[in-house]
Amino acid sequence: MALHYQLSFALLAVLVAFVPFWVSPLKDCVQIPELASRKLDSLETNTLLSEAEHLFKDDLIGPESLAVDLSGSLITGLADGRIVKIYEEEVGKRLRYTVLARTGIDDPKCGSSIEFEEECGRPLGLELINNAKTLIVLDTKGVLSLDMVTNELTTLATHSDDGVVITLPNAVVESHDGKLLYFTDTSLVHQRRRIFWAAMSGARNGRLLAYHFANQTVSVVADGLFMPNGLVREYDSPCVLIALTMIGEIKRYCPEGDKAGLSTFASNIPGTLDNIRQYEDPSIGIQAYTVGIGTKMAKPFSLPWFLAPYPSFRRWICGLPMPYEWLYKLVPKYGMILFLDKDGKVVQTLQDPTGRTSWISEAVVSNGSLWAGSWLNRHIVRLPWSSSSAATEGSAWGETSAALRSLIKS
């Protein structure tokens, strides 16, 4: 009888060890050498993000990207496929929002599960062009254009010119001359609702694409990238900056000149990168960038760093019989927004070590507030952001302003 139990236990152990590996949806897991060889640095912590307000709770779910119109109102896309405009009432100054469009069907199930994104739509990257008369939207349904006067949606592209489907369109920015839209396609294999599989695989199949207004074509600008995500124009140049989510690195792509092609703009950034935006403080004449951070990558522990050398283990984890959502629940919550100078150096961070305000995708400033979005959270984040804010010294704005001012002296 004892032998029977021993054999049963051994068989169970074999099944637990090997079946998840065999049935895993990931067949192409590879090493992530940029992380495997990296040494974690210590992070000087602060709590400047801890007291942020959470607005429109359980109403605006997953406001991933933020665009600011000429009036300072915010436009964002939500998990249920809606594109909304957040504005301040003239009387009473209360915040309201109005629905501009939906990228998919209008159904109560939309937003309740990521499994409905393909039919409900899931707007991600946003870019206002044409003097804010047109909003470019990257969605599960492709590259879309929203007329801000009529609220009419038009599909610009679903494939690149080589016939490959645009699988995970993520961030978009207009070129310096207005002739192109640069945008990232994070994975050739996994849609947004399975973006963690793209992260766990380590596969370098992301692309930087360009939509050409003149002939309505989509060219491949760069490929072989590992999870290209956020995108922004570099100051004073025709180049764009590309945030590579999992390896804490920002690449520069230049279409011409001495720096033509891809080069490294910033590396060893202490977090997983999402969207990157320009940040200007005209009061002190400083130009910088904000970067939304999913979770920190610093001592004493980072899950992406820990898993990087073990592709078979990552494949095994993704084959476990558990809900997909558990994958990101394994990631420690840690809130952070980075400020980079024009040379790619981290000059300031806003942090929430408690994780109450976490999974930050993007940060922009409008009408005296810093606003932060998230692809996951069920609210939008706001921080006071002006010299007239109460208790300026020691505030998020005060500390950031002081850090940026130090660049003038250095």
Image (spheres, rainbow, N blue to C red):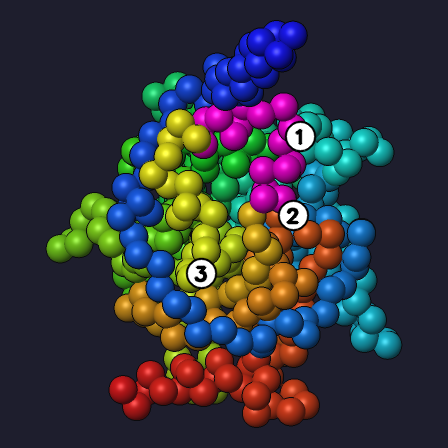
Q: Quadrant where the N terminus lies?
A: top right
Above/below status of 47 relative to 151: below
| Amino acid type at image mark 1 | Pro
Q: Quadrant of the C terminus?
A: bottom left
Residue 318 included in the magenta stretch of the image: yes
Q: What kind of element bears circle 2?
A: loop
What's under tag 2, amino acid-wise? Leu
Question: In the rendering, at what x and y percent does residue 281 appear?
Answer: 47, 79
Mark 1 or 2 closer to N-term? 1
Q: Is residue 33 left or right of residue 127?
A: left
Residue beneath disc 2: 376
List the residue tagged with mark 3. 300
SS for callout 1 = loop
Look at 62% across and 31% down and name the residue there: 324
Inter-mark Cα distance, 1 to 3 = 28 Å
Q: How far is disc 1 from disc 2 in space, using C-alphas?
A: 16 Å
Read off the magenta span: 314-330
Disc 3 from disc 2: Cα separation: 25 Å
